[in-house]
Amino acid sequence: MPEMRAPKKPMKREKRMNLVGWSMLLPWTIGFLVFTFYPILTSFRYSLSDVDLDGAGILVTFVGLANYRAAFSSAAGFAFLQSVLDFALEVLFKVPIITVFAIIIAVLLNQKIKLRGFFRAIYFLPVIIASGPVITQLANQGAATIPLVEQMGILDFINATFTPALARPIAGVFDELIVILWFSGVQILLFIASLQKIDRSVYEAAMIDGAGPWESFWKITMPALQSMVRVSVIFTIINLATFSENPAIQHIKNNMFALETGFGFSSAIAWIYFVALALILGIVVGLLSAFARKKART
């Protein structure tokens, strides 16, 4: 008589759910490893090498930290470091403007007004069409600034009042004010989503207690937007940092195909830019977290 095999135990539900979850993540994981993680490792290897392109392919010769030393000692490296410093100053001025503008527009578009969906689409439209070349062409045609700024001599006043290091980013804010506001489309949607989560009964209770619109905004709206402000600031910094017309990005692209620098030097300054961006984000997040803790104690 043949031996009876014991029936297989059914797979546990938790294990089945884990397999389903990993199967859903598998395409993204493969794409990340092939198209993101591997290029990151390759760029780091190039930053430590002298990369030559010839008919036989890519010739990679390990040179250690020579490219990083050149980034802090050569003329091309100094120009790149100056662009990174300019970007840090731009973040100091542009991020608050974009964040405040996004909050104001989000509050207005969250009201019960006619054509509210149309106006939301209008403010988000630049996110779709305003690529780097498009913005460059608009800026060259004078569509990026407000004519009144130049007519009133505001730029001349800034250049005469501040040092060149400060005058450059401040004048850039006024000179590209419209472009800066175009970067607020995603942030506006984020703030609208947060505003819609606030229970309207909270505002009604505040009105019964005698609170006006100004008090309700600072005591109810802003505390509810506090976490989203942090997300918006981080997104804005990364968006400005990865913008194709960013001078630092332009330096990285130009040095990539320059005969005197090449892929190795370009990869090295790209990693320096990455570290600088990580430091900026760390400082900003730390300041926002400290401010949030201070507000919570008071």
Image (cartoon, grey):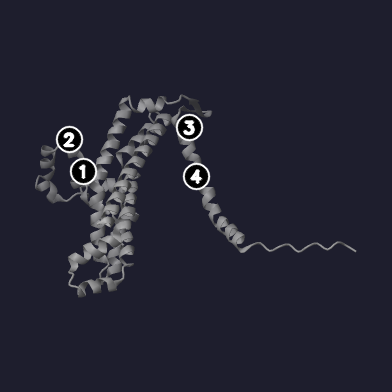
Which residue is nearer to you in this view: 157 or 6?
A: 6
Q: Mark 3 vs mark 4: which is more N-terminal?
A: 4
Do tag 1 and tag 3 residues touch (Cβ < 8 Å)? Answer: no
- What's the CA distance linking mark 4 and mark 1? 35 Å
Residue at 34%, 40% (x, y): give it: 279
- Asked which secondary structure carries label 3, the reply is helix
Q: Amino acid at mark 4?
A: Phe
Residue at 33%, 48% (x, y): give it: 239
Do tag 3 and tag 2 residues touch (Cβ < 8 Å)? Answer: no
Question: What residue did someone put label 4 on?
Answer: 35
Q: Mark 3 vs mark 2: which is more N-terminal?
A: 3
Query: Where is residue 170 shown, x and y percent of the image?
Result: 19, 43
> Residue 116's quadrant in the figure?
bottom left
Question: Could you say which disc has been placed on residue 45 in the image?
Answer: 3
| Mark 4 crowd level (few <14, some 14–19, many ≥20, 10 Å Cα) | few
- What's the CA distance linking mark 1 and mark 3? 36 Å
- What's the CA distance linking mark 3 and mark 4? 16 Å
